[in-house]
Structures are given as structure tokens and as C-alpha cells.
Amino acid sequence: MEINGFKIEKFNQYGLDEGKKLNICPLCSKDRKPENQKKKVLMCDWDRGIGTCQHCFEVLQLHTYKHVEDESKKKYFKPVERPVNNLSAKLLGWFEKRCISEYTLKNLRVGEGAEWMSQTKKDENTIQFNYYRNQKLVNTKFRDGNKNFKLIKDAERIVYNYDWAMYSSDVIMVEGEIDVLSFAECGYLHTVSCPNGSTTKNVNLDWLDNSIELFENKETIYLCFDKDEAGQNVQKELIRRLGSERCKIIDLSDCKDANEYLIKYGKESLVNKIKTAEFVPLDNIQTVRDTENDLRNFWKNGCEQGYKLGLEGLDDIFSTYLGQYTTVTGIPSHGKSEVIDAGTVNMAINYGFKTMFASPENQPYYLHQDKIARKILGEKVQNSKHNLRIDKTIEFMNDHFFWYHNSKFDLEAVLAKAAELVKRKGIKCVVIDPFNKVRLNGSLQKNVNDYTNDYHCKIDEFCKKYNVIVFLIAHPNKMKKDIGSNKYPIPDFYDIKGGGEHYDMSYHGLSVYRDFEGGFTAVKVLKVKFANLGETGKTAYFAYNLNNGRYTGISNPDDDPNALFNAKHRNYFLLDDTVTQPEIRYEMQANTEFDFEQRSENPPF
């Protein structure tokens, strides 16, 4: 039996009344008052295999599905195992000073041996931290005496000490392998670490997708990361993706990491730190102490800067925070989807943000993917002679953009899949395009205002829970041309069906308008939630490049007749094949020679 092309492994896994539209929710009913436990609040869509609880608002799969090996899944290099039994006296002495015994080293299969290190360009004696999954070696991290590190090229990256933690109900997560050994020395073998530490810039958790099943059965996840900016960035992202409701923070007082604490205070004290760890503050409840650092930072530095779409001119009048959503309107064919496409590309390049598109109007998907590719590559891909850049563009898109694929576009199913992508891929943006074709099926029987209200509540709840930005694209009703003019007015919230609710509930609003006679595009800010994020009523103007789909900021054409003529249409945006400096990008004006330009933001590759 199949549903939506997936073979069912276990039909009706919760034992519900088969075929009934309403059932008792298996997730929350047992926690309700006795008189309410048998209330049928789970709306079941048996055709799609999805149930939605009207009490706890959880979306669950009615069935389990057979796993089919993805032939397109990346193939990893398989390293050869090395002997780990003969550790030198020097290495054992080095670990002994760090209060880690030979027993623990052998238990976690730590090795030693010569390895060529690119940092020193010669063979070095190294500590070898072996990464196993299901008793098979998948990677090794090498560390030499000068604290140089390397992992095996093209091998899979997973958490360190995967096997010991797989079947425990709890797990401790730390930043490095020696911290894993420190907790293991205290008897806590179910401790894992990141394969590539942490950085102060974009948090790279690509390895989490290869290890996500490790965390699925965990009741409590203890987090113990360095207190510097890099460690805290990783910790915050893990809380967001693994769920704050099951994360506890281990506070190591005045110590940088677990090994330093073990050396300074001993095993008993480190064990006590685990026992006294506290849950991440409850969602929806805050005290001044929870936000004290933010409050003091606001007093000192003012409001934090919002995230921008990377569109010159618009960035001066509009930005947004994570956990908020923006309603975008515009007359059909005026470019509202194109503007948001350009914004998500720029946010991927500038912030490393990943985006999921739920867009029934952008099928077949390869046509939409071509639009994204042109914005990244800087030219029509079919005209490009730069095969390496095309390959890099595809790789960049594969890492940063995801398309929701289903024959039916239901808002709850879309948001459920987006939540899964938050956990597995760390997406930060979701584009719903358009509002009228991604339906909230559970509210279709309601009047337009109540339906729109429910729709926005679902999006708002999702944004806050997963700290994600959503762009909701909504077509206006049929517009009438201005009296005495051949032009349509710029639409606003009230031109959308259910417009009052769109205005009241949206954090922000944008309207995209293309002046076909003048040859430019205008983006008007209809609403910003907070004054520091933009200016309501202001408009930015753009020239649109048909060759690459990019927008170039220009001055108001009504004030500057030469605005379009002076627009600099940039065609290239990628690194040259021979350039290694990450701060240099190719840029080219139409029909001119290549020239290098220094830029402050990070390139995509």
C-alpha cells in the first residue's frame, strides 16, 4: 500500500478509528482532565496520512513508511581502520595530566600514529579520534602536538562517540573530543561532540543531518559548550533545532570546558554539575534574568540590527528579525516572487540562511531553480561557458534551497515539513507562494476574516517556535486603473482578500510594483512592526536585469530621469576559478572587461 508515492510500513500506527475524520489525540489526551480525555480533537486526513490536533496543535503521521535508500545521496569515502591498542607512554602521560585514564582511551578507541598534516607540510605524530557508527569507522580526526587538526577528506561527518550514545535515553553534547573523554572518565559514556568545533560566524551544523536519528529517542539533551561567542552560537542553534523543552545546560562556572573543570575540581564535582544542570528557560515564560544581557545591551547599544534582503535602497528602509513574517503583495506579473527570490539568494550569501519554498505556482521546479541559479551565477546558465561555476552554483543551491513537493499544498503539512527541515538542515527562511493556493484546510468552512486570522496564527506560531523568517506572498483582488491613467495603483494590504486581518497580524508588509512604461520596479514598505527595522510608507526603486534576474537599486525615476541609464547591471557574482581569497568577487558591467572589486560580505563559495 502506498500514500503519495511512499510505501507504508505500519498502517494506522496509533490504532485510531480507521476512516473516521475525528479521533482521540494519542499525544495530549492522557495529559488532559479526566472528563476531556476521550474528546475527539484529532482531525484525520486519511488520504494524506496526516492528523492534526485541535488541542495541542501537533501534526502527526498516521502511518509509518518504509525507508527507501536514496540513490542520489552523497557517497562518502570509507576510511581504513588502524590499530588502536599500542598507545605510547608519552601519549598516556599527556592524557594522564588531563585526568584521562588509559582505560577510557581504549574504551573510546583512541589511536596514535604518524599522519601528514597540511599545516606543517610533513608527517607528525598524532592523536587519532576515531568516529564509529554501528561499529564501522566513518571518519578520523587527527591532532598533532601543535593543536593542528584535520578530518579525512570526503569522509562522512557525524558526532564523535555515536555508538556509545545511540541507545541511551539521555545524551551529553560537548564541543570537542577531549571533553567527551572527560565525561566518559566520570562514567558518562553517552557523551558526543561536534566533528568540527564551532566558529564565531555562520554556524555550520551540516553534520547534524547525518546524526539526527541519534537524538530522536532522547528524553534529555545536556549541552556543555565553551562560553565564548563561537561555543554559544552552536549551543543556541542546537537548542533551536533539537527543542528547548528537552535541553539542559551544564554550567562549568569559571572553567572554559569540561576537561579544564575535571583537572581543576575532579570527577565528583563534574558529576554534580550534570546533576544540577537546569533546563533551558520555558517557552512563553520569561523573567528579567532570562533577558538581562539583551536588556543591558539595548541600554548600551540600542536595538539590534535586523536581517536585510541585500537589495540596495530597500535595505535602508526595511529589515526583519528571526521569528517574524512578512506579507508581500503585488499585481500578478509585477515581480513580487522575483524580489523575494532575490532576497533569499542574498540572505544565503550574506548570512548563510537556508530557504524552503512552498510554491505551487513555481512548477515545474527546474524553471524556478533556473531563476535562482541565474541570480547566483550572474548570467543565463545556458549561455555560460564557465562549467566550474555552474557546478559550484548547483552545489550552493543544493545546500541552501529546498522545494516542498506534494500534489496538495496544505499549510499545516507545509509547516510540518518546514519544521523537519529546521531540525535536519537548519533552514532559516520559508516562502509560501501564494496565500490562496497553500490552503489551511481545517479552516476552509469559516468566513474570510476568521480563515485569514487562523492562517496568520499558524504562521506566527511556527515563526516563534522555530525562530524562522516567513515570506507570505498574497495576490491582491482584481485592481482597477487610476482614473485618467493607464496605470494601476500600488496595491496595499486592503487590496488582498481578508486584507484587514493581513494588516493587523503581519509583522511587516511589502508591495512590489512594476512600472512597465518607465521600465523600473518599486518596492513599497506597507508596514514594519518596529521603527528600528524600517520606515512604513517609504519606497525603493530598482532596475531589473533580464539576463540574470537581479535588481539594482536606483534613485526615484521621477526625480532622476537618468536613473535607469546609470544603473550598474552586475552580471557576475562568483569567485574566479583561480582566485583563492574569499573576499574577492567577480563583477562585470555589460559588454566590458572583467574587473575585481573588494567586497565586505562573504562570497557564497
Image: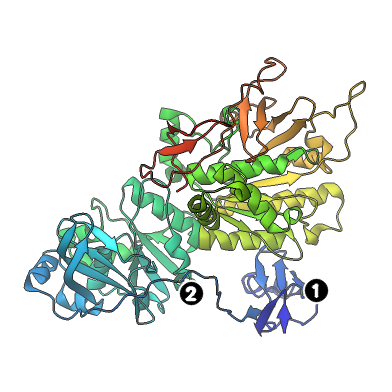
Which amino acid type is shown beneath numbered disc 2?
Asn
| Residue wearing tag 1 | 21
Residue 502 rendering spot, x and y as whole percentages: 76, 41
* Circle 2 crowding by C-alpha within 10 Å: few under 14, some 14–19, many from 20: few
Q: Residue at x 75, y 32 (%)?
A: 513
Of all residues shown, which one is farthest toward the right?
Answer: 484
Could you say which is closer to the camera, residue 419 or residue 40? 419
Instruction: Using the image as rendered, state which of residue 152 and residue 344 is in the foreground.
Output: 152
Residue at horizontal 42%, vertical 66%? 221
Q: Which mark is residue 217?
A: 2
Secondary structure at badge 2 equals: loop
Q: Is 346 above or below relative to 420? A: above
State the image coordinates of residue 576 (x, y, percent, origin top left): 44, 43
Earlier along the polypeptide chain: callout 2 or callout 1? 1
Residue at the spot x=11%, y=64% of the render? 97
- Can residue 40 be seen at all in this image of the molecule? no
Q: CA distance from mark 2 to mark 1?
A: 29 Å
User: Which of 33/401 is in front?
Assistant: 401
Which percent across, then down, holds residue 49? 72, 74
Residue 360 occupies quadrant: bottom right
Residue at 87%, 58% (x, y): give it.
445
Q: Which amino acid, by three-letter code, is at mark 1?
A: Lys
Residue 556 drawn at (x, y percent): 68, 20
